[in-house]
Image (cartoon, rainbow, N blue to C red):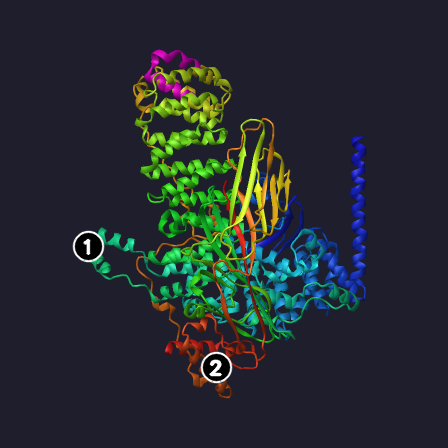
Amino acid sequence: MIHSLFLINHTGDIFLEKHWKSVISRSVCDYFFEAKEKAVDPENVPPVLQTPHHYLITIYRGKLFFLSVIQTEVPPLFVIEFLHRVADTFQDYFGECSEVIIKDNVVTVYELLEEMLDNGFPLATESNVLKEMIRPPTILRSVVNTLTGSSNVGDTLPTGQLSNIPWRRAGVKYTNNEAYFDVIEEIDAILDKSGTTVFAEIQGVIEACVRLTGMPDLTLSFMNPRLLDDVSFHPCVRFKRWESERVLSFIPPDGNFTLMTYHVSSQNLVAIPVYVKQNISFFETGNCGRLDITIGPKQTMGKTVEGLMVTVHMPKAVLSTNLTASQGNYTYDLATKVLVWDVGKLNPQKLPNLRGSLSMQAGAPKPEENPSLNIDLKIQQLAISGLKVSRLDMYGEKYKPFKGVKYVTKAGKFQVRT
Amino acid sequence: THTHTHTQTNLYCLKSRLLICIKNEDLKEMLESNKESLKLEAMKRVVGLIAKGKNASELFPAVVKNVASKNIELKKLVYVYLVRYAEEQQDLALLSISTFQRALKDPNQFIRASALRVLSSIRVPIIVPIMMLAIKEAAADLSPYVRKTSAHAIQKLFSLDPDQKEQLIEVIEKLLKDKSTLVAGSVVMAFEEVCPDRIDLIHKNYRKLCNLLVDVEEWGQVVIISMLTRYARTQFTSPWKENNEKTFYDSDSEEKKGQIEAKPYIMDPDHRLLLRNTKPLLQSRNTAVVMSVAQLYWHLAPKHEVSIVTKSLVRLLRSHREVQYIVLQNIATMSIQRKGMFEPFMKSFYVRSTDATHIKTLKLEILTNLANEANISTILREFQTYVKSQDKAFAAATIQAIGRCATNISEVTDTCLNGLVLLLSNRDETVVAESVVVIKKLLQTQPTQHSEIIKHMAKLFDNITVPMARASILWLMGEYCERVPKIAPDVLRKMAKTFTIEEDIVKLQTVNLAAKLYLTNSKQTKLLTQYILNLGKYDQNYDIRDRTRFIRQLIVPSEKNGALNKYARRILLAPKPAPVLESAFKDRDRYQLGTLSHSLNIKATGYQELSDWPAVAPDQSVRNVEVIEPVRNLPSSHTSSYLLALANITMISSIFPMDFYLGFRPKGISTVHSDPSLNIKSNSPVKLAVFILNEI
């Protein structure tokens, strides 16, 4: 399926190649570079390209292109999903997925790629399985290894590969047994000029961090599961139990994982936590414009809005800005024309405001459209949909684990049209 | 100085080559040392070279000696090297073969499997018989992991030597019977690559594959679902009512036909089994799995059941940009045929200014497909925002979309047309040009009422520079010259002045305009036309010279061409059918959804056609599996443990009948699988379980 993989940085250097079948010359990437040239922005490069003898499927993650070469028909999502899984694995192993990190750990990267695919077909993609075969690098271990000559590579088949629960490794032991769940909700919204909601929905995800000894069998139940409209699960979740009882029953992987993602039914009105009063205008004459943005709390359920940030992609003609922020800092990047206003905590008594003038390129026509505002924010201890976990039970093991649930609401793709 | 720099670069090249030589010497020394840690360090550097795409083939003899190393990491790195260079150094590679042959007999299943992996990855034709033997043995291994590896090896051997096909099919046939979830995906992959047309091999394994599906790993699920989609289209009759009704109304007299139709459609239980067992996978975290179930429902389910996949597909739009791209493409194809499926989720396709251009255009495509009388005002309001976008390519695409809405929904044609006319005074040239082109198409559908707009466009003509837009206006002038009798000749006059500096498409349309005016208003335009035809006669472009010659013969009466000249008016001024503005995704459904071919809209290498439903279902009994051996045949010493396992299964299955395949995995079964000490067929308990479930 996947013939070869090339890793390319954003300036177009191929810095790693791996072939699972016979070697394909890196000149095949030229077709990709051509498309990249045409697309201007790296995000605009089409993910699927056709060349005379091959097909190229590419993802763009963390300023890197993962380019795979395909020779025959294959579902493109299969390849895309796999490439993202590779990037996730690097992130998981090395803490980040960047050119420097990959070059520094090139041997581990190669060992991982070797295990993840056989003849271009995925072999082991579960983090728990991979970690048993190839241990992630730590400073201590690399020191010990150089002294003793022992290795990072296991010589037995990971237990997960054989069992029906491939996501969990066997023989897990902890002195402190704990299970934490983060319920994270993101509000996706488009608000129009007048502040009316054009579109809004809530997407949620439950991230788990489970460190439990043995083979625990967990059941997580909700106070109000009816809220959940569309769900997707980690393979460990027993779907039939969800169908019949609306509880999450599962034997968890060891460590961090995404337990489920959900969508809150669109019938419920979505609470919009902040309102934005804005006035952006460009004048016909004088090559200048004005900007005035104020943000205030709307439906915050009595909680504090934090991490407030406004990002504006200005029209190309805006040369510089001369603004005053009543709170926080703002920056304007001249090259990318992105204005970022980092507000911080929202104080309902004293609303943050950003105002001032924009200077425009002389002679440029007045921009047709005002730029949209992208809002970022965070509210701790609140799931905006009202979803609540009622209890977590453990079966199969005798000890008493420490349990915790945390809620947080964030802005997802939250855009205000102006 | 030029030669000087040349020698300098040459020198530099030599130097670096020398440096590599020295480096390689160092590495060779390290590889041949007695110290494990030095060897490992050297191998790590070699792998670093391979990763960078540098040539390290010179080290082959030094590396291959370490193939039997006790250090597992060193050994693995040597494997990486071997697989990369064996093809180039076939003779030396043969030195390592005996090591692998020995490792294939190792008691540790992991070592057996990795030996087979490497042995089968070495593309050296001489060892084909050895590979064949190893694959056959591994296919009968007790460890399902080794059997999985053998399924992968089948594909490798097949691509190395396609002549082995028949023997390999035998192994595939055997592995298809395997009941381990670990093997299923890989063997189906081998089947798809080696013998996708041998659908007969699937019959007996069909039900088993359906039942195993939820427990197979994600990647295997995608492959199996895609294969089963193809299988089902050859084995079951169509569940789509329309078809049945059509044949019903078509047949009037034939008695024989009538008898067949009298039978109402009943879905084959095996067809239902597939639909039922794939449905839970819509909740998978793997986007490829969700998409494969969606395409299965699209191609196999009764029409009213297809919409259950909608929500899951919309969910995928929250994923990475590349995932969005593929999913949106598929939704675009689906939404042409089935508006209703996605209409409730219309707002999920609203464009954000931060979306990539290809995502924006796809969303636009879908919104246009979803437009109907009820929602058109909402959609047009949304489009107004898009037209103003800073991304001009996207703004142009929006104008096209407005044009499509206008032709599809007659209630809004006038509103759209007026809106587009307003855009003609837009500051941006691409927006104006696109509007002209779309207006031209719209006017063709109802020209009688719109001479005002044509006049307006004639006035704008001087300011428009985009060739396509100029050509469109000229065409409009010519086509409707009788409706703007005063303006059209004047436009021609202007064109005569600028003819030589215009683009080719504009020149062609000028010639057209001249010809049409000559036929309708020769008094005013005869001289102008002749002038333009003379310019065209000597144009650099042969298309224009050609067209000019043709037009001249057609319209200017002479002795030679009398016959055609009579019809000139009917040829040039014939009423022309209005262009149909349709989706770029209109014909995409000829490809199976979710495939590479669908994404690229070309037939990709190795694409397997989805066949049409058979008119009459082939024999259903081919899928029946022979009766399972009774319990008493089991070795007596183990009976008790089986009974225990069976008791478990019976109990569980009576509580959650379906759960057996979904979440709950009785421990008894998985241990029996991998335990070689039990001297029986490793898969019997599953068979028994299935048997018992059937009994209940």
Identify which residue, A167 or A409, lies in the foreground. A409
Q: Which residue is mark 2?
A: B645
The residue lying at 32 percent from left, 58 percent from top is B239
Residue A80 relative to residue B581: left or right: right
Q: Which chain is mark 2 on?
A: B
Q: Is residue B516 magenta?
A: yes
Work out whether disc 1 and disc 2 sit on a shared chain: yes
Could you tell me residue B241's position as x and y percent?
29, 56
Q: Which mark is residue B688?
A: none
**Whole-percent x and y of residue A378?**
56, 55
Which image quadrant for residue B487? Answer: top left
Magenta region: B510-531
Q: Quadrant of the N terminus of chain B?
A: top right
- Left or right of A382: which side holds B27? right
Please identify the quarter of the rendering in which residue B268 is found. bottom left
Q: Do we see residue B135 in this rendering?
A: yes
The amino acid beneath tag 2 is: Ala
Q: Which of the labelled discs sits on residue B254, or is there none?
A: 1
